[in-house]
Amino acid sequence: MPPTLHPDTLQDRFRAAVLGMAVGDALGFPLRGLPPGAAAQAAERVEDFSPRPRGRYQKGQFSAHTQLMLATAESAVASGRVDGRSVASHVAWAPWMSAGAPLGVADPSVLSRALVPGLLSGDDPARLGQEAGVLAVVTHKEPRAAAACAAAARAVALALTGRRWAPEAWCEQVAAAASVHDAGLAEEVRHLPRVLGWDGAKALELMRRVAPASALRGAEGLPAHVTPVLLVAFYGALKAPHDFGSAMRLVLRCGGEVDAASALCGALVAASLGTASVPVKLRRGVAFAGHLEDVADRLFAVAQRGRRAPAVAAQAAVALRR
């Protein structure tokens, strides 16, 4: 993180990232599976949550994406780092190195977990890439899933700085993180700036189709594949970096696997702007809002300990040389 970023500001951005993910997820949860036309109509109403999402849940309820992020966060708080065995035990008991779905399976469920290494890695892309691989392999053996997790984590780390990046430079940073695991996904991210000037409907349809034919077959809206979901989340964050509501409207109109995309997009936009960027009604009305802030604060404490450790070690080394 930049040395000029005050700890209070950084802590607020940790809270914003966690709340932004949960709010984006909760906005997308009722729209998951809808065709784009129906989703586009509902996407205009992002000032408040659906009163009874999917007919039986409480207002402000988020999906399993945020629940998996929270389980990953609790694991990191307990371990003081990202640890595969600990993550597996918090999600569900599993032999973490062999439990993942077989090669070829790359659904978007891996993306929400990327928030945790993104918040904790600081400006250490090598550590981030390794931790993203550890998180992905718990549920996916497919390298593209690890690449998407690394790309999302790097995007979160960049958002925390609050710096305004040119899209090409931003995408290059994110693509470099993805390339550790999958060069193909990295190239898709590098091409993203080309569609930012296109008509929105045309751009979203193009990104929707960046998926295997098997994933597109029978799918309405975003297919259940990590690549188009990741690209659409990034697209929303790059097209509307200063307006949480506008970014949500862009992403939610896609339908299909939209909750995963809106969750990641919400985390990115909110993390770069702070908690005040998320409308009050949404950040207070999302389910378990107090718990979400508490988790963010505990992650911030872990991150602060991690950032102090190198400085303490350096001071000790100097003292020994004396």
Image (cartoon, helix red, strand yellow):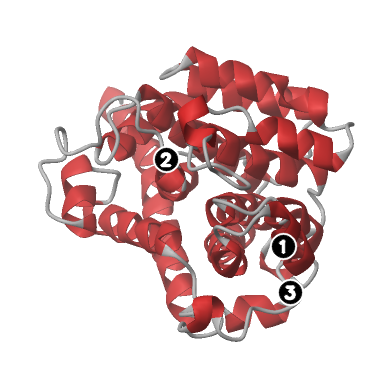
Q: CA distance from mark 2 to mark 1?
A: 23 Å
Residue 212 in view of the camera: no
Which residue shows up at 35% across the image and 32% down it?
105
Looking at the rendered image, the quarter that the C terminus falls into is top left
What is the three-letter code of the residue carrying label 3? Pro
Residue 38 in view of the camera: yes
Q: Which mark is residue 107?
A: 2
Image x and y of residue 229, in percent: 57, 41
Residue ID for mark 1:
38
Relative to residue 28, is residue 315 drawn left or right?
Answer: left
Q: CA distance from mark 3 to mark 2?
A: 30 Å
- Classify 196 as above or below 288: above
Label 2 or label 1, whichever comes before in sequence order: 1
Asked whether disc 3 touches disc 1, contact meaning CB atoms under 8 Å apart, the reply is no
Which residue shows up at 75% across the image and 57% down it?
37
Toward the front, the furthest residue is 218
